[in-house]
Image (cartoon, grey):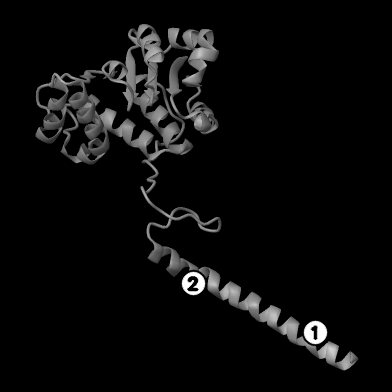
Amino acid sequence: MARIVLIAGFESFNIDLYVSAAELAQARCPGLEVCIFSDRDIQTSPDAVTTALAGADVFFGSLIFDYDQVLWLRERVQEIPIRLVFESALELMSLTQLGKFVIGDKPKGMPKPVKFILDKFSSGKEEDKLAGYISFLKSGPKLLKYVPVQKVQDLRNWLIIYGYWNAGGPENVAAMCWTLAEKYLNLPISAEIPPPIETPNIGLLHPDYSGFFESPRQYLEWYRVERLPFLWQAGARSSHSAVRSIHLISLRS
């Protein structure tokens, strides 16, 4: 049984979402175990977290900045074969390793757009390293088309994995786990891994609409077609009832 341990910082409110994602991931990949924790569990349930990490094949961390938690995790995750850390303290992000791709290393044949960003990591200033890393995370998925499949496959997979994580939602997190299981843990998946479900940075939601409205214009067009006729009919019925009530009152008087 292969194990992924996911620890999310500053996101205790999202734990139920990640648990749902773990259940979905395990349902389509019986040989996979996904353990979900928040950064609070490091204080409240350190033994449980330690036990999970001790047998892990993959460590995944995000938004972990507390200094004591960072040091505690560094001691326990350094020997885990696959380490993926996003938007956290540099002491943790520097442990990132996926196959031959290691943060700070620049493999031969690195595409120029990617190499330019990764060069930021060689700066002596910690703030420059952090800025370079965050820039890479934000622009990285857009660089996929420049990344050759054969030369830097691990880098390409790292960008794909972050694309799922950055998109959010239980379906995307589950697909992220399937990608790791299929490509690095040699586990079969019972269905094809779907592409990321994109979430716009800004959008509108309506309970009667599936998805997001990406602009007010799109929402107004939908509202005009789907809602106004219904509201007009409801209003007409209400007006007709009101007229009947008036007539009844007049007759009785």
Mark linked to residue 201: none
Residue sitting at x 22%, y 34%? 135
Q: Residue at x 55, y 31 (%)?
A: 16
Q: Position of residue 33 (x, y in %)?
A: 49, 19
Q: Residue beneath label 2, please?
A: 225
Residue 99 percent location from the top left of the image? 26, 18
Question: Closer to the observer: label 1 or label 2?
Answer: 1
Secondary structure of residue under mark 1: helix
In this image, 232 relative to 1: left or right? right
Which amino acid, mark 1? Ser
Q: Residue at x 22, y 27 (%)?
A: 155
Q: Secondary structure at mark 2?
A: helix
Quadrant location of residue 149? top left
Q: CA distance from mark 1 to mark 2?
A: 31 Å
Q: Which one is in front, 18 or 155?
A: 18
User: What's the mark number on residue 245?
Assistant: 1
The percent coordinates of residue 69 (x first, y second) are 41, 14
